[in-house]
Every structure is written in C-alpha cells, then in structure tokens.
Image (cartoon, helix red, strand yellow):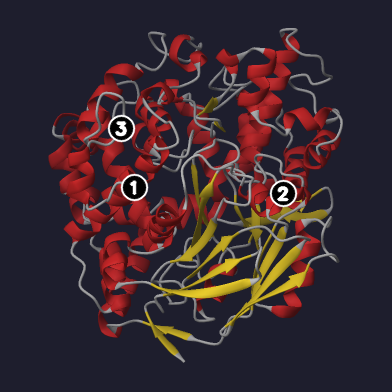
C-alpha cells in the first residue's frame, strides 16, 4: 500500500476502556498546521480542558509524524509529542529521532492520541489494523534498554519509559532507540497512565512523494547544502553537538558552577574534539540522517553514547566536573532510568549551591562526583535523598529557599547557554513556550558562534526571536531535524557571500528586511512536493506563527502571563568575570518590543485580533 505524503489518519486510544477509533485529518487542518508539532497541538487544543492534572487520567499525550516521515528526505526520521507537562503545568512539546516515527508512518498512521489510564501496566502494539493493548507486567520495573529489547519482537519501532517514568519523576523522558523525548516530564505522563511503552510493526506501507520530480530536486539541493555547510558536515558530523563546547567557552556562555561563571580552562577536556581524540568516536545516528551528529565512543572499556553538549555542560561544567568518563556514566544511567539530563544536572547544581549556602543538608559538593551515580538512581526510584530532587529545581527552591539561584523558567530547568553572554538568547529563554528551552530559537548561534548579531546588544532581538520561533515551529511540524537550519540559512548565496559585518548591521538595524531575505524555500518545497499540494513560503511562515501563538494561547489558559516571562534573578542582576561592563540581561526593554511584535497585550496574552487573524478559535 502506498501513502502519498501522509495518510491523514490518526489513531485515538482510550486506555481506560481499551477501545480505539480513527480520526480523519481534514485538508484545511493539514494546511494550517502542517503536521508534527503543529497538528498535534491543534488536536490537543480541541480535546484538553484547561486546569486538568497533568498526572491525572484526563491528560492526553499525542505522538505525531510529519509529511516527509518515511521518505528519503535528509534528516526526516523524526516525530513530535505534545501533552500537558507535570514539571511546568503548561504545554510540553518535544521532537525526537529514533525508529518510532517511521515505523508508525509505514504502518499507515500519521499519529496516535492517548487518553485515559489503564488499570494495570500495559503496552500498545500497533499495526496497520489498529491497536492491541497488552500486559506490561514482564517489563514494568525494567530499564529502557531491557524494555526496548522486549518490544523488538513485535515491531520495528518502539517508545518506552524507564523506572523514572513509572515513578512519575517530573523530568522523566521517553526513549526511541538511542533518542529521547527529553523535556517536560513526558515519561511521567506515560507512567501515570500505566503505559510502559508502544511498539509499532512498521513496513506495511510505502510513503511516496506526491510530486516525485520536485521532491527529488529539493532533496538533492538540501543534501548539497548540508554537505557544504561547515557546521553540519564538519563540526557536528565529526564531533557531535560537543563541538559547541569550545565555542561556548570562548564566548562566555558556558554554565559553570550553577551558572556563576561562563568560562573554564578545563572545558576542552569534555569538548567534542577531545572526545573524538580520546574515545574513538563512531557514528550512531537516526535514520535517515545526513548530518550524523550522534556518536558512540569507548568509555571505561565499554562502548557508550557520547554525551551531547547539553549533558556535558549541565552534568559537567555546571557541577565543576570535567571528567568525560564520569559524565558518560551519568549519561548512561539517565538513559536507562529515563531521565532528562538537562534537568537532572540543574537539580544537582542547585542542590550543591544550596548545600554550600547552608540552605539544605547533603553530601553534594562542586567538583566532587562522589555519590552522584547512586543519587541519580535514587532520583529515578524516588528513594531517600533522591525523592526530593525528583520534584525539580522550582519545587526544591520553593521549599528550601534559593529561588534567586534556581536556574529555571516556568518550572523547566535551563539549557546549557548562559544568556548574560547572549542577550537575545535571554529573551528567548524568558518567552519560550515550554520553559527555558534552547531550541525555541537557538539565538546563541547567531550571537556568539557566528557573530551575526551583537551578543550583548538589544538591537533587533525581539524581531529575531519572533522570526526563529515561527520558523522552528514549522521545522518541527514539517518534522525535519532542526540542525538542517544551519544549511538552509547559511548556504544560499545571499547570506553565504555577504560580508559578515554587513549581515550584522542589517540584522540589528533593518531586522525585518534582513529576515525577509532569508531563503527558506527548501522547507516548504519539501512539504509541497511530499503532499503534492501547493504551499507558498508565505503560507509556510504563517503556519509557523499560527502554531507558536496557539501554543502560547493554550499556556495563557493555564495562567501564564508576563509574570512568568522572566529569568532567574541571578541572570538579571549578577555579573560574572567574563562579562564586559558587568550587569545581567536587560530583559524588560526587549520584552515590551517582543509583545508588540507578537500581537500580545501588555500582559503577554495574544490579542483577540491576533487570534482572529491567524484563524485560531477561542475556547
């Protein structure tokens, strides 16, 4: 059976009743929300009542593929998930690689909506005919590796949670192969539903483009750009995201000792370059992938996943630890237990500082790895000292004090870039829909890595944040790897051959014009040729704005407003030795400009006129 672009069929399962139905996606819905994150958000919006308990039976979790899943498009083996986060109490979205998305698509389904709660632990087995609910008694209490091995007998792709998800750790994640739906506690949502995993048979359907000639032309051009770009074909292909370590250290945005510093001479030892030199790195990637950023290496005599940049910072420099062997061990523990390394590293960093200050008692000390391996396992089990840490940084700091050095926004722990050296990234963190998310805009790349905008300047930052929020919403709805943006933005001749100082001047002083000249035609070109339906660049951008504003509006229904669009006090007030001129992030002036650009009122709520213009119906 052939699928042209997408089947427009989504499964909806109720774990309480054991029944499932089939939802047909209408053409207008697909055009407005594209797929992936966007379509999943729309389906969640139509079903989820504000104010429900994220760990109650009324929460819903949705997994959704994009129109290019199952094709030969570069870096297209991805899918999205959306739910209400138990960590933040607002909407959680996440994009993931691994085998699950393509297996679901090739079974004839674009996505799956999961409601209710099973009476006992179960897993779902999906094929072209629908869903079977089966007992998970044999794998409940098992780690993610053992659970995946068990489910392989029934399918080509699976999702599983570890013991952290079963125990409802608020930053537990979901595993697909060697990749993770990492942020916001999605693993706890599955655990609260007694859902250990999902396995998909796959291979029943073949996905073919609606316009094969146009698709192949677009695919080849994107591949050329990826192979020509120094970041995608050089830094990330050779060293993984660990290539960001030396750049962040040189730019003064590296988290050190719970974000009290921005640089450290020892940081090279945990960089991607050092890992490649000392640990025999080999590719371990998603399929199909053309960037090849994932790697494995030899640590302590065994092959393990090479920690990503976020892990090496938050569980390394942020704890004042620079031993790659130890960080790789902690990374593996989190992978098997099913916990987000960004949140786990931040929680431990906060606890180290709180211990130093006498706010709480623990054996944790900056620079010392003693006891952390066992603590991570105890966090997954919610046992002993780990039980409190499993609640996350916000709840800990509300109990013990130390809110000013709790590195979180909207309840989500901060990613590995200190915004005092990247002010646009500071604005991005503050307003990001899911919390302190580095992927909402990744503006640190323009400001620090590429020098295309002054890192400690407010010029043009509101417009840049809005633009990249919209674009990355489309990327995660087309459902292609966000790292393709380096190639798409930087390789077209207008950007590639324009002198960097001129680009910087335009981005800061003629922001709207400069961003309108960005050539993003490859992404809507993939969507159009995959579906066989015309989508203009304007329509693609409009969809991105609609998706982002819908997510914001859903959050405002949960009580989010200007009071929540802020940064930890440390980042607003404290200076570091590496900050020229001192001072923190001047957030307020950028925030006012951002709200105006977005069409939000002074409280940060989307205006009725903005919702109407985007075709979002208030509920």
Question: Which residue is at the front of the view, 131 or 351?
Answer: 131
Q: In the rendered structure, are the residues bearing label 1 and label 3 in contact, judged by CB atoms less than 8 Å apart?
A: no
Q: Is residue 57 above or below residue 222?
A: above
Mark 1 vs mark 2, foreground winner is 1
Please state if 544 lies on the left or on the right of 340 as rendered: left
Q: Is residue 46 above or below residue 123?
A: above
Answer few, some or many: residues within 10 Å of disc 3's Cα (few below 14, many 20 plus, some between 14 and 19).
many
Q: Quadrant of residue 594?
A: top left
Q: What mark, if any, has residue 619 been given in the picture?
A: 1
Answer few, some or many: residues within 10 Å of disc 1's Cα (few below 14, many 20 plus, some between 14 and 19).
few
Identity of the residue drawn at 27% across and 66% down: 31
Alpha-carbon span between mark 1 and mark 3: 14 Å
Of pointers 3 and 2, the one earlier in the residue sequence: 2
**Residue 559, position in %: x, y?**
43, 31
Of pointers 1 and 3, the one earlier in the residue sequence: 3
Mark 1 vs mark 3, foreground winner is 1
Alpha-carbon span between mark 3 and mark 2: 33 Å
Instruction: Return the residue at label 3.
Output: 605
**Residue 80, position in %: x, y?**
49, 58
Please state if 338 lies on the left or on the right of 452 as rendered: right
Answer few, some or many: residues within 10 Å of disc 2's Cα (few below 14, many 20 plus, some between 14 and 19).
many
Instruction: Return the residue at label 2.
Output: 165
Q: In the rendered structure, are the residues bearing label 1 and label 2 in contact, judged by CB atoms less than 8 Å apart?
A: no
Q: Secondary structure at mark 3?
A: loop
Q: Secondary structure at mark 1?
A: loop
Identity of the residue drawn at 76% across and 41% down: 330
């Amino acid at each position: 059976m052939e699928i042209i672009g997408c089947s427009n069929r989504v499964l909806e399962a109720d774990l309480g009743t054991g029944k499932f139905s089939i939802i047909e996606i209408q053409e207008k819905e697909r055009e407005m929300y594209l797929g992936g994150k966007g379509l999943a958000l729309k389906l969640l919006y139509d079903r989820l009542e504000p104010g429900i308990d994220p760990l109650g039976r009324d929460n819903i979790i949705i997994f959704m593929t994009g129109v290019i899943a199952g094709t030969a498009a570069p870096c297209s083996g991805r899918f999205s998930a959306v739910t209400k986060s138990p960590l933040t109490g607002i909407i959680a979205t996440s994009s993931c690689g691994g085998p699950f998305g393509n297996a679901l698509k090739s079974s004839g389904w674009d996505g799956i909506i999961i409601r209710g709660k099973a009476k006992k632990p179960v897993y779902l087995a999906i094929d072209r005919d629908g869903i079977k609910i089966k007992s998970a008694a044999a794998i409940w209490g098992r780690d993610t590796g053992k659970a995946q091995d068990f489910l392989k007998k029934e399918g080509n792709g699976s999702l599983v949670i570890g013991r952290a998800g079963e125990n409802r750790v608020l930053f537990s994640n979901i595993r697909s192969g060697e990749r993770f739906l990492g942020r916001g506690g999605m693993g706890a949502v599955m655990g609260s539903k007694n859902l250990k995993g999902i396995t998909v048979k796959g291979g029943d359907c073949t996905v073919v483009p609606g316009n094969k000639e146009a698709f192949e032309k677009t695919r080849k051009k994107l591949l050329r750009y990826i192979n020509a770009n120094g970041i995608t074909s050089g830094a990330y292909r050779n060293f993984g995201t660990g290539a960001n370590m030396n750049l962040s250290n040189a730019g003064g945005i590296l988290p050190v000792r719970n974000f009290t510093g921005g640089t450290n001479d020892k940081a090279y030892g945990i960089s991607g370059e050092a890992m490649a030199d000392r640990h025999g790195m080999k590719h371990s990637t998603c399929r199909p992938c053309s960037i090849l950023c994932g790697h494995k290496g030899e640590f302590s005599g065994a092959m393990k996943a090479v920690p990503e940049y976020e892990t090496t910072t938050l569980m390394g420099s942020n704890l004042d630890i620079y031993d790659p062997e130890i960080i790789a061990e902690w990374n593996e523990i989190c992978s098997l237990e099913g916990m987000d390394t960004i949140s786990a590293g931040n929680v431990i960093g906060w606890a180290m500082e709180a211990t130093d200050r006498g706010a709480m008692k623990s054996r944790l000390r900056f620079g010392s790895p003693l006891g952390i391996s066992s603590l991570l396992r105890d966090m997954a089990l919610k046992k002993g000292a780990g039980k409190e840490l499993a609640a996350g940084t916000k709840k800990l700091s509300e109990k013990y004090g130390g809110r000013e050095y709790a590195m979180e926004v909207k309840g989500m722990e901060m990613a590995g870039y200190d915004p005092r050296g990247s002010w646009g990234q500071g604005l991005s963190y503050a307003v990001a829909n899911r919390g302190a998310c580095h992927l909402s805009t990744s503006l640190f790349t323009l400001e620090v890595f590429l020098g295309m905008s002054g890192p400690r300047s407010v010029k043009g930052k509101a417009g840049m944040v809005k633009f990249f929020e919209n674009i990355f919403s489309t990327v995660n709805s087309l459902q292609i790897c966000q790292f393709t943006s380096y190639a798409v933005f930087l390789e077209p001749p207008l950007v590639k051959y324009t002198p960097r100082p001129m680009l910087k001047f335009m981005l800061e002083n003629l922001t709207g014009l400069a961003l309108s000249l960005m050539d993003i035609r490859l992404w809507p070109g993939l969507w159009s040729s995959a579906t066989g339906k015309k989508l203009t660049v304007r329509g693609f951008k409009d969809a991105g704005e609609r998706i982002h504003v819908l997510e914001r509006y859903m959050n405002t229904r949960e009580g989010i407003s200007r009071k929540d669009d802020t940064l930890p006090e440390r980042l607003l007030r404290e200076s570091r030795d590496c900050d020229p001129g001192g001072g923190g992030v001047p957030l307020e002036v950028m925030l006012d400009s951002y709200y105006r650009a977005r069409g939000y009122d002074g409280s940060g709520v989307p205006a009725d006129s903005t919702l109407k213009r985007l075709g979002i119906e208030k509920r």
